[in-house]
Image (cartoon, grey):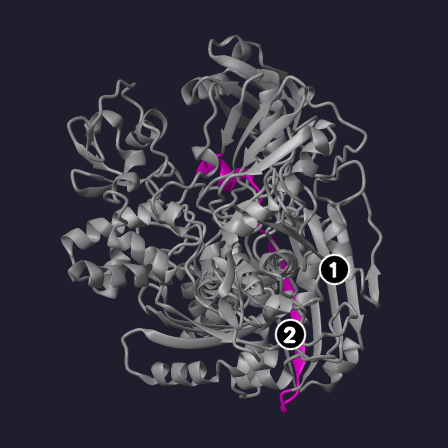
Amino acid sequence: MMVNGQPVTVETEPNRTLLEVLREDLGLTGSKEGCGTGDCGACTVHLNGRPVTSCLVLAPEADGCEIVTIEGLAQSGQLHPVQQAFIQYGGLQCGICTPGFVMAATALLRDNPNPTEHEVREAIAGNLCRCTGYDKIVRAILAASDVAER
Amino acid sequence: MSEHQIVGKPLPRVDAREKVTGQAIYGADFRLPGMLVGRFLGSAYAHAEIRRIDTSRAEALPGVYAVVTAADLPRGEHYDAGSRAHAVFAGDRALFVGQPVAAVAAEDLATAQEALRLIEIEYNPLPAVLDPVQAMDPSSPVIQHEGPADRSEMDVHTQQAADVKTLEDNENDNVVNKVDFEQGDVARGFAEADVIVEHTYRVPMVHQGYVEPHSQTALWDSSGRVTIWISTQGIFDVRERLAETLGLSASQIRVISTEIGGGFGGKMALFAPLVAVLARKAKRPVQLVLSRHEELQASNPAPLSVVHLKTGVKRDGTITAIQGKAVVDTGAYSGAPMTVICIMLGQAYKCANVRIEGYEVLTNKPSVTAYRAPGGPNAAFSIESQVDEMARAIGMDPLEFRLRNAAEEGTMQPHGRAHRRIGLKETLAALRPAWEDAKRWKQEPGDQWRGIGVACGGWEGGRGPGVAFMVLDEDGMFRLVCGVVDLTGSHTSLAQIAAEALGVSPARVRVVKSDTDTGPWAPMSAGSQTTYGMGPAVQEAAADARRQLLRYAAAYLKTRAGKLTLADDQIYVTDKPEKHVTLKKMYDLANGWSARFKPILGRGTAPRRQPAPSFAACVAAVEVDPETGKASIRRLVAAQDVGQAINPLSVEGQIQGGTVQSVGIALWEELAFDEQGTVRNPNLLDYRKATAADLPFIQTVLVNVPAGDGAYGAKIVGEPSIVPPVGAVANAVADAIGARVYDLPIMPERVWRALAARG
C-alpha cells in the first residue's frame, strides 16, 4: 500500500486491523484507539480518499490502497489550513481526538468546500470529543473552509 | 485596573502544533524496546468468594512472561482493606464485575488474551447488592471491609465546619459514612411555608468519558527502582500510591506523565500498581492499556445518587425550609463525594432552616472517584429542579426566584460555614438578556414542544500550593519548569503569567514539564486550580529570574537595575537604548567556565491560595418531539464567574466542555447495570456521549467578581461549568412537556412515562 505518499509493504496476520499496523508496525501513532469498535472516530484515516475508522478495517483490506494519516497531512512542514484553524480557534484541548477530527474535516472539505454549520456537524458526528463541547471545533472547520476557498 | 499585555489574551495553546500533527505522545503511543502487553482478567461476578486460582496453564503458554495475582503483592503495614487503591487484585473476595483477579504480561495482545483464557478461577458466588437504597436495608448482604472507611472526602469538607454531627459507623451494614447538617428548625420552616414541594431525584453512575483509556508502562531496573510512564493527572499522587502498594520508598519510584487524553478526575493511579507488579515479575517493560469495555465496566465512575428533597416556600418567594436525604452509592469501596452533595443541596440559596442527612453506601459495583465537580451535577439536578417547582408553584419567574434567594457573602451554608465573597448574583444577573431572549424564542411557532430552563450552582475548588522554577537558556529563551500535567491548557496560561511577570512576549517562554525525579513537587491537575494555585509560584519564579538578570545586566552596563528595560532578546538602558546587552550575552556572562556572574535560577513557591469559589449559571432551550419524546438542545448559554480570565480562549473552551458533559448527564448518559452487576452498555455506541450533531454553538458569558488571591486576578476555572446545565436542561424539558422527569437521563421513554403519569 501507499502510506502518506510512500510505498510500504507489511506482512501480518489477517486478523490485525489497519490501525494496529499503522501504530505498531509503521510507528504512526498519530491515529488513536479510543474504543476499538468504530464508534469514537479517533482512528480516522483516509483510505483511497475516504475517511474510515481504521480500527474496523482489516489490514488485508488496505492492500493496494492509498492511506493518508494525520502524519501525512502537513506538506513540507506547512500545516494544512484545517490544522492551522484548529490551533488558531482553540479547536483542541487534550488533543487525543484531534487527529481524527482533522482527518474527518479535511475529507469533508475536499468533497464540500463550503459546508454549512449543519453539514459540518453531520460530517463530524462520528468523532467524539469530551473536552470541547464541539463549539470551537466546528468554528475552526468553518474558518478553514473560508481559507481553503481562498 | 491596569491593562495587561499578555494575560487576558486568547493565545493559542503552546502544545497545539504537536497535537494537530499527531506528534504528541499519549500513554499508548509510548514505546520501549522489549515491551510486553499487559492485560488483566476481571471478576465474572459482582460478589463472590475466590476459592482457587490456577495460573499454571497460562504460565506455560509460550510468549507469556508473567502471571500475577493478589499472592504477588504482600500486604504491607499500610494495607487498608477498605481502600480500592490497595485492592490491586481481588483477594479473598471479588466485589464488582470486572475487578482484576489476575493479570498477564505477554509478547503480544493475542497471546495475552489466550493466557487469560487459560487461567482457572473457582468462584463461590455470593448474593450481590446493587441498589444503594436496598443496600441500606439490614436484610441486604453486607459488603463491609475490615478496617475503617475512607473518611478523607468527608474530613476535607467538614474540617472548618462548626455544627457538623457525624454519625457513628455501624459495621453491620453497607453504610460507610453518614453526615447530618442542621441549621435552624425545618419543622418551623414548613409551618411558615405556603407551599411544600417534595420529590426524589435519581442520578445514575456515569463515566468521565475521557477518549483516551487508562494507559501506563512500567520498567524496573536492577537496583529495584521502577519507572512508570503514565496518563495521569498527578505524578506525585502516582508515586505515593506505588510506594504504599508496593512497599517502596518514594525515592525508588520515578513517575513520568505522558500527554493525557482527558482525565476529568478519573485518572490518577488506579492501574499503576498493577502494571508495576507485572513488570517486576516479567523482568521486562510492560504496557497496560484498558479497553473501552474495561473502562466502562471496571474503572472508577461518578456516583449514583438518590436525593429526597422536601422544601417549603412562601408566596413572597422566600425559601423557608430545605430538608434533604442523600443516599450516595459509592460502589464497592468508599470515597464518594457524599458530603459535597449534602453541602451543595443548600449552598446556593438563603434559607434559615436546613436539615440534610447523607449516607454513603456500598454496593457491588466499581467504586467511584472524582468526575469534574464531584457530586455537583447530582446535587444540582435535585435542588435546581426543586427550586423551579417552587417558583412555578407561586407563579414567580425561575430566574427572578433564584436572584431573590441567591446566597451571597455571609450567607450560612448547611455545614456551618458562611460564604465568602462569591459572584452568584452577578452570574445569574448576567444571564438576564439570554433568558429574555429564550422567552422570545419559546413564543415562536414550531412543530415541536419548546421549553426553556435556567439553573445555577458553584464549586469551591482546590487552591495549590504551587512551585516552579525558571532558567535562561543560551538562545535567550526563558524555560519554565514545573511538574504539573497540562490537562486543560494550563501550560499556556502559566506561560502567559510568566511572560507578563518577565515583561517579554509569550513566545520567549517555553514550558517544560518535569517528572518526579527531574523537578519539584507539583499538585495534581484537578480541583480547577492548576492555574489558580500554580500561577503565583510561576509569577514569583519569573520575577525572581528577572531580578537576577537585571542585577547582572546593571553591573555589566555599569548602571542601576531601575534604569533598565527587559525586552524580548535584550536588556537596554531605558533612556539610552543603544546601551544594551543581548540575552544571549547575559547567558554567557552567567554560565560557562569564564562566567562573570552566577547562573540565573528563578525560584517560585506559593502557599495555598485563599478559597475562591466560583459560581456558574446556565440557560437552556430545548425542543421535545411530541411523537417520540426525544429532547433536542437548541440553545445553551453558560455564565461563570472566572475572575480575570488569563486566557479567554482556554476559559471559554473549559466552560463549553463542562456544559456539554452536564447536558450528557441530563439527557443521554448512564452506566446501565443489570441484576448481575454487569454493565449492559460497555461500548460507545450504547453508552451515549454527545456528538457535534446533538448540540448548537455554546455561548459563554465571563463574569469577573474579584476574590481570592490568584495571579492577575485569576480564580478557579475548570469545574463549575458542569454543575448547572443538568438542572437547566431538566427544567427546560419540564417546561416543554408540562411534566417532570425525576430520574436521569431524560430518555424519550421517560418523557413518555411522565406525560402518561400527568394524564
Q: Residue at x 74, y 79 (%)?
A: B410
Q: Nearer the viewer, residue B632 or B433?
A: B433
In percent of width and height, residue B176 lies at: 75, 48
Instruction: State whether residue B667 appears in this view.
Output: yes
Distance of label 2 from label 1 (alpha carbons): 16 Å
The x, y position of residue B506, in whole percent, is 47, 59
B541 relative position to B686: left or right: right
Q: Is residue B613 left or right of residue B108?
A: right
Query: In the rendered image, which residue does mark 1 sit on?
Result: B157
Q: Is residue B353 above or below residue B529?
A: below
Q: Residue B348: which numbered mark, if any?
A: 2
Residue B342 percent location from the top left of the image: 69, 63
Q: Is the residue B394 above or below the residue B549 in the image?
A: below
Please tell me how crowded label 1 is: few (under 14), some (14-19), or many (20+) other residues with Cα within 10 Å. some
User: Is residue B714 among the parts visible in the rendering?
Assistant: no
Q: Quadrant of residue B314?
A: bottom right
Given the image, what chain letter belongs to the residue carrying mark 2? B
Disc 2 is placed on an element classified as: loop
Q: Quadrant of the C terminus of chain B?
A: bottom left
Q: Position of residue A119 (x, y in %)?
A: 22, 60
Nearer-the-camera pick, B258 or B399: B258
Q: How many marks?
A: 2
Please say whether residue B63 is one of the residues in the magenta stretch.
Answer: no
User: Is A60 placed left or right of B645 in the picture?
Assistant: left
Q: Is residue A75 left or right of residue B617?
A: left
Q: Identify the mark nearer the N-term, 2 or 1.
A: 1
Q: Which segment did they paint magenta?
A: B290-317
